[in-house]
Amino acid sequence: MATSITLDRVKKSFGGFDVIHGLDLQIDPGEFTVFVGPSGCGKSTLLRMIAGLEDITDGELRIDGERMNEVPASKRGIAMVFQSYALYPHMSVYKNLAFGLETAGYKKPEIAARVQKAADVLQIGPLLQRKPKALSGGQRQRVAIGRAIVREPKIFLFDEPLSNLDAELRVQMRVEIADLHQTLGNTMIYVTHDQVEAMTMADKIVVLKEGRIMQVGRPLDLYNRPANRFVAGFIGSPKMNFLRARVAEGDPSRRTIDVSGLKLTLDHPVEARNDEDLVFGVRPEHLRPGEGHKGLGQAHVQLVEHLGGSTVVYTKTDTGETTTVLLDGQQPIRSGETIPLSFDPSQSHLFREDGQRI
């Protein structure tokens, strides 16, 4: 049966310096949760606190409702996969998988059964007699994951496990880890700084910044309704365009905003002060060249990236603000052109001066 994890006002301090600031989080049984955020946001520290490798300064960690703060790592029913494979170079793959069970006192038949089961799940049966030096990076990562599987833990923790792999292998391993979750059904927490990994793998994403949770939700919820400018800029690739904005003067309905000198009429009144600096956001894939629902004026094309299946156009507005446009397929747009840009207002966002979504 899958396991739940609860963080209740959890804090972590190092020498009086707070790095995790009273987090509350509920991870449901069997959920694949991804902690994502920039370097230094506290995601790996939080993972290590759940694993029992870091003490909790304040607050409470509960697994299936039972307080875990003082329970040693070995007693929490958790297996962790690290960024470095940490395989024993002098041991075969079989011995690497079996070693932890041997030291725990398991009998040989039980060890053999668990190793074979993990090898079948990960499709590494033909590799069991090889040494790590004879394996590719992806194969080594499968062995590292297999070492966690043989322990039959309640919870799997992954700390940036794909960072050492090349781009093609990362895509392949993303699929394999997601398939592993479907096969095993365990609760899994995965740490990454790569928002593409988060979007493609997670049931639930936790976006962190400077030891605080910025937003928690399903991938498309965060994409479609970011709670603040930080999440809006972090989730999505290429990142969202942000333009300076204000409530336009002389409009009693408060539906008109001034975006870099361009008047735009929105569907709803803007709840902001007349003198408040706002930020208008629209994703590159929601901008289109030519006249459309709403016009953003003329944009000067600075660079075009022809990627085959898509085209990325980097432009600059008359007011000097940069925008990125993501188009499907192969587009006949060239550097030096001036093109009109339009957008669908239902796909736009408005943020306050403090970054919160309006």
Image (tube, rainbow, N blue to C red):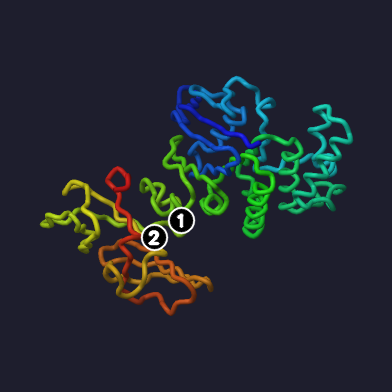
Quickly name the residue at label 1.
236
Q: In this view, does 264 lie above or below 1?
A: below
Question: Mark 1 Cα within 10 Å, few/some/many (few <14, many 20+)?
Answer: some
Rendered view: 5 above or below 315: above
Which x, y percent locates residue 214?
Answer: 42, 41
Q: Position of residue 19 (x, y in %)?
A: 47, 31
Q: In this figure, what is the number of numbered marks? A: 2
Q: In this view, does 116 lie above or below 78?
A: below
Tag 2, which secondary structure? loop
Q: Which residue is drawn at 54% across and 26% down?
A: 61
Using the image as rendered, state which of residue 100 and residue 111 is in the foreground: 111
Q: Which amino acid does label 1 sit on?
A: Gly
Q: Disc 2 residue type?
A: Arg
Q: Mark 2 points at which residue?
A: 283
Q: Tag on residue 341?
A: none
332 and 227: which is toward the camera: 227
Residue ID at (69%, 26%): 74
Residue 304: image quadrant is: bottom left
Q: In this view, does 357 lie above or below 166?
A: above
Residue 35 at x, y = what percent?
A: 53, 42
The CA distance from mark 2 to mark 1 is 8 Å
Q: Is residue 110 left or right of residue 267?
A: right
Picture quadrant of residue 286: bottom left
Q: Residue at x 55, y 54 (%)?
A: 200
- The kind of secondary structure element at disc 1 is loop
Q: Which residue is drawn at 40% across and 66% down?
A: 325
As drawn, is 256 to the left or to the right of 339?
A: left
- For the view shown, which residue lies furthest in the bottom direction? 332
